[in-house]
Amino acid sequence: MNTPFLKNLFGGMPVQQFLAEYWQKKPLLVRNALPGFTGLLSRDELIDLACSDEAESRFVSQAGGRWTIEHGPFKRERLRRAKKPWTTLIQGLNLLLPEADRLMREFSFIPYARLDDLMVSYANDGGGVGPHFDNYDVFLLQGIGKRRWRIGNQRDQELIEGLPLRILKDFRPKHDWVLESGDLLYLPPEWAHDGIAIGECMTYSVGFRTAPAQELAEQFLMFLAERIELPGRYSDPDLPLQRHPAEIGPAMVEQVGRLLAGIRWNDKLVKEFLGHTLSEPKAQVFFERPARPLSAPRFAAAAGKRGLRLDARTQMLFSDRLFFINGEAAAVPAVDRASFRRLADDRRLDDLAGISADGQTLLHDWYRCGFLAPA
């Protein structure tokens, strides 16, 4: 299948204009954004993935007006015998297909810290997952076939009770568009949408996460729990006799409040939290160490000739002098920081020129963990 290079993604609109006028503000439909794009894999290849242990797959059916959802891997016979219409979705295609990872990275005008994954869905005629809304930004690229998209920015987000999917009870679309191969639709978070296949079709979705404040707070408090050290302890040497032994007295409340007020954080701690959290691999992601790892000298020689590339599963981020890879902090020598920033941005290095001995040792350690490899 062909893999386009997104030089003209927004129909001639500069990326800066897209960010200023559309990003997290309003939808954008671009006709023929990817001329000649028909997708990255065939229907049979997608079905093969849905039947594989490697893929995170789902099967959604609305046969007879009843919605059902199942999680893979599936038996091929199950999909063949399923009543129409139905949809099969493969999450994290970027972890399974190099072309999908390259396509996803074309959206690097959005920070990697926001990037989630690339999902592909196949649907036969009438297939879809119902009108719903998502809490993330998404770019929808149409591969083979046609899909009708109805979208709206309604405030009413009440869902139908008793269904296995999050389907809106009262969907009121404002736009009704049919996307064909190569068309692109951008949707900000919480825009209601309903995509229905016209004939068989495949759609590629590049999603960008938007964590709720509550989720960030909970994760940050867990992060703090491992790092804070408050001096002293609760004490009450002047304890008066209480009338009610079951009462939590005001003196206790006041003292514990003073102790908790000692919890402090700064920008550096927030950067560390974000680096650890946002580079953390998903639960189903595992790294494979090389069966016969190269020695440090042979690794350096191979990387010097062919360069290095990050594994598709690796998430590498940085903030000022701080570097993070797959949920871990990395002590990068000052002299090597420019090269390591380039590795994080480009996800590869052409050679090891100028990288210190300590920097090469760190890269070799990452290679032995399966985080990167000679290109």
Image (tube, rainbow, N blue to C red):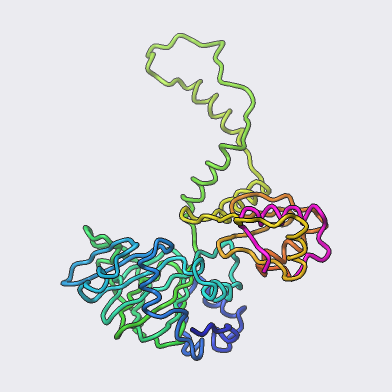
User: Which residue is drawn at the image coordinates 53% and 26% (left, top)?
Assistant: 256
Judge from the rendering whether residue 130 lies leftward or rightward of residue 11; answer left or right.
left
Magenta segment, which residues?
Answer: 351-375
User: Which residue is drawn at the image coordinates 72% and 66% (left, top)?
Assistant: 342
Query: Which of the 4 image quarters holds residue 259?
Result: top right
In this rendering, the answer to whether 159 lies above or below 362 is below
User: Which residue is drawn at the image coordinates 59% and 54% (left, top)?
Assistant: 289
Q: Position of residue 359 (x, y in %)?
A: 77, 55
* 343, 259: nearer the viewer: 343
In this rendering, the answer to whether 195 lies above or below 221 is below
Q: Position of residue 305 (x, y in %)?
A: 76, 70
Task: Spot the residue most to the top.
Answer: 241
In this rendering, the answer to whether 93 lies above or below 296 is below
Q: Quadrant of the C terminus?
A: bottom right
Judge from the rendering whether residue 125 lies leftward or rightward of residue 40; answer left or right.
left
Q: Position of residue 280 (x, y in %)?
A: 55, 53
Query: Which of the 4 image quarters holds residue 350?
Result: bottom right
Task: Check if residue 271 falls in the magenta segment.
Answer: no
In this rendering, the answer to whether 309 lies above or below 199 is above
Q: Position of residue 68 (x, y in %)?
A: 24, 64
